Image: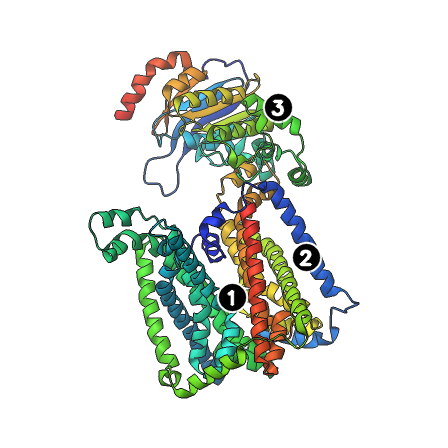
Amino acid sequence: MTDLPRIASLEATGPAVARARGWRGRVRPRAAGRVWLVVWVVALAWSLSSFLGEDHRVLNTAGWGAFTEFWAAAARPDLSADLLRATVEAAATTLAFGVLGTLLSVLVGIVVAPFMSQTWWAPATASGPSRLLRAGGLLLSRAAVALPRGVHEAVWGLLLVSVLGRDPLVGVLAIAIPFGAITAKVYSELLDEADRAPYELLREAGAGRVTALAYGLLPSLLPGATSYAFYRFECSIRSAVILGMIGAGGLGLQLTLAFQGLQYAQVWTAIYALLVLGALIDRWGAHLRRGRARGRWAVSGVLLAVLVAGSVWHLAPDLERWFSGRTLELLSRLLDDLVPPSLPAGGWSELVAASVETLQMSVVAISLAAVAGLLVATVAARGGTSPPRRVLGWAARQLLLLTRAVPPPVWALLVLFVVFPGPLPGAIALGVYTFGILGRLFAEVVEDLDQGPREVLAELGAPPLASFAYAVVPAAVGRLLAYSLYRWEVTARETVIVGVVGAGGLGRLLEQQRAGFDYPAMTTTVLALVAVCLLVDLLSLAVRATTR
Amino acid sequence: MSAGPGSEGAAVVALRGVDVSYAGSAGGPALQGVDLVVRAGERVALVGPSGAGKSTLLRLCTGAVRPDRGEVEVLGRSLSGLGAAELAAVRRRIGTIHQRLHLVGRLRVVHNVNAGRLGRWSTWEALSSLVRPRETQAARAALSRTGIADKLMARTDELSGGEQQRVALARVLVQDPDLVLADEPVSSLDPARADEVLRLLCETVATPSRALVVSLHDFDLAVRRCDRVVGLREGRVVFDRPAAEAGELREALYLLERG
């Protein structure tokens, strides 16, 4: 987990070999970097101008009162005993979604990963048909996880709610389906990347397959796999909140209900609960990442086991209902509704327009997040020596914590107070949320940098900004770019959750279709979203391959 | 203690009765009763076992370490009474070379060389140079003195280890300092390259008004390339001789190390 960009790159489309080779050699990296920069600036300008154009008024001064009222309530959250009890209960539900969702994802990952690995599909004989068959198998297995992974947890949640109703397991399953697929993908890549020499050696010495695997391969896989599992846990908790907002229960639901009732004091109680939960998990992750001692993982493992048992007890899932005839009937009816897909009411033009809008929203959001994140991260990075610098750093870290603890739909509702509806508030909301995530990752990058060059420059009397520009920015830019590109793809997928509150793009289309029970069209919209995410993924792959 | 040969030049570094101890360290003081004068035009090697205090002595000269007792005078200024701005002004005239080169790999060579100018450039000049490199002639001249003028526009992390060492030296050349301090600059190099790097290092102070203080593990190299050799052990100066006379002390240093 010390190297998230590497792990993030494992989530990307395409086998590792292709990424390593990429387009390199054909395009000069430096020239490619400039070309991409120009492309990006043009895309951003185009997106912004299409959001702002057509004499759109942007700021809605009428909502200013509600907006300030909301922030004023931060100082006086509702701390009544009843609400606090409900909040703790809701937090436990959210945590349980996250814990069980992660557990299920990791199990799916472990079981499915071998079948997705190139190692598994490596041709045994050199004959043509065997090669073709094996390559086809690999492609098919990869394609099979592309769909569950490309669809956002919230969409899975919406679909599952219509089959299972308000079952607590909706939250768990909605996380486990997409996250299980992505975990399987990452684990299969780890498997392919692992050094196989010890395994082959043990096999040659006569060890059985399982023994050889346990002694020769697992030890080198374990650190990467555990780190990634914890990273998924952090993501799962965030997703659990969003799933709550669409009805699965927990803090997300409490937040939404309070917001709809304009009970800002209660909203803030839920936000503070989210902050505490987020801070605890951040600390836990940092604790595991920074330390090398084996004891840390052991203690955390026991703690996780307790959490899993507690989560099962808390959610008390009713498995019988799952396998009841009624569930099966609902599922088949839903499948009937969804397939075959049909075009939305507005035809291809509406679908394309919404897809383009989604793409534009993701571009604006990630640009906002990356620029603001870079500026704040330099302040937020630990290592300041003077007291004012430390206070400022602490404040910056709290800001980042707040922006990423509050889920994007809530940011969208807030932005909608002061900005007229449309894709722009959605993009701003996503940008604010992603800013919290990127800012923290950036700060970690800056903290982990070799301080040598910077100190040398400071010693020979360079102005602070100059030594920052010469020593810090160039050293960090590769990882910052990798993080930003990785989050860009995530952001494109997340446009759907701000779209649900009416903020534009494919998400808004999806919500309209859901409200009108137009299931066949929903399928098409979801497929369009998967296509947009794939495009973004391939673009970021191209950028990463040509700039190093 | 006498300053040894070359005492006609002005004192660039003067340590008088300096004690340094690091808080919380289990061992004895890092430096004890050290007197040392380095004059303009001198190339002085510090030799001695690990932990003898060589690095501490070099760090004293940049003001990074403050003495518990005694006085440190660098480039004519006593460091003890200096404010931050005045200390920065002194540091600007000191070039430092470390065993780790502290280059920024993703920057082009020209920027890593120009980093030596940052003490004199304004923030604006520094930033604009990243877009359109300034003073490329000076950078090219420095690189041709270290033998890699053709690498001016190459990316630094694409250079070999030896070439990177030359970039670091060129950075000191464009900084144009009056005092060069080098802490184990060649300890990770093979003998032939170490000799070459030390030759280039001595060239950075070719002008008679300048001085070089370099800590070395290789006794032969110190004798061959420097004017003066100072032996350190357990924080004390054991000997301080012209290089020509120091050869016979090698045995003594090894004996001391064993003892």
Above or below, A154 against A548 in this view is: below
Residue A95 drawn at (x, y percent): 43, 73
Q: Identify the subunit bearing mark 2.
A: A
Q: Secondary structure at mark 3?
A: helix
Q: Is residue A214 above or below residue B250?
A: below
Which one is in front, A214 or B107? A214
Whether residue A383 is visible here, answered yes or no, is no
> For the point 24% across and 50% down, which residue is it?
A203
Q: Outermost residue toward the left?
A: A206
Q: Chain of mark 1?
A: A
Q: Real-space Cα distance between discs 1 and 3? A: 56 Å
Q: Nearer the viewer, residue A527 or A542?
A: A527
Q: Amino acid at mark 3?
A: Ala
Compared across the picture, whether A161 is left or right of A200 comes to right
Can you give x and y, in whole percent of width and height, for residue A336 in the image?
A: 51, 81
Residue at the spot of label 2: A44
**Residue at the disc numbered 1:** A150
User: Which of label 1 and label 3 is nearer to you?
Assistant: 1
On the image, numbered disc 3 is attached to which residue? B141
Residue A516 disc label:
none
Mark 1 lies on a secondary structure that is helix
Pick whichever of labels 1 and 2 is earlier in the sequence: 2
Subunit of mark 3?
B
Quadrant of the snapshot with the N terminus of chain A: bottom left
- Report the quarter where the C terminus of chain A lies: top right
Give neighbour class at mark 3: few <14, some 14-19, many 20+ (Cα, 10 Å). some
Say few, some or many: other residues with alpha carbon within 10 Å of mark 1 (under 14 / 14 to 19 / 20 or more). Answer: many
State the image quarter where residue B141 is shown. top right
Query: Amino acid under label 1?
Result: Gly
**Closer to the eye: label 1 or 2:** 1
Residue at the spot 37% in from the left edge and 76% down from the top edge? A311
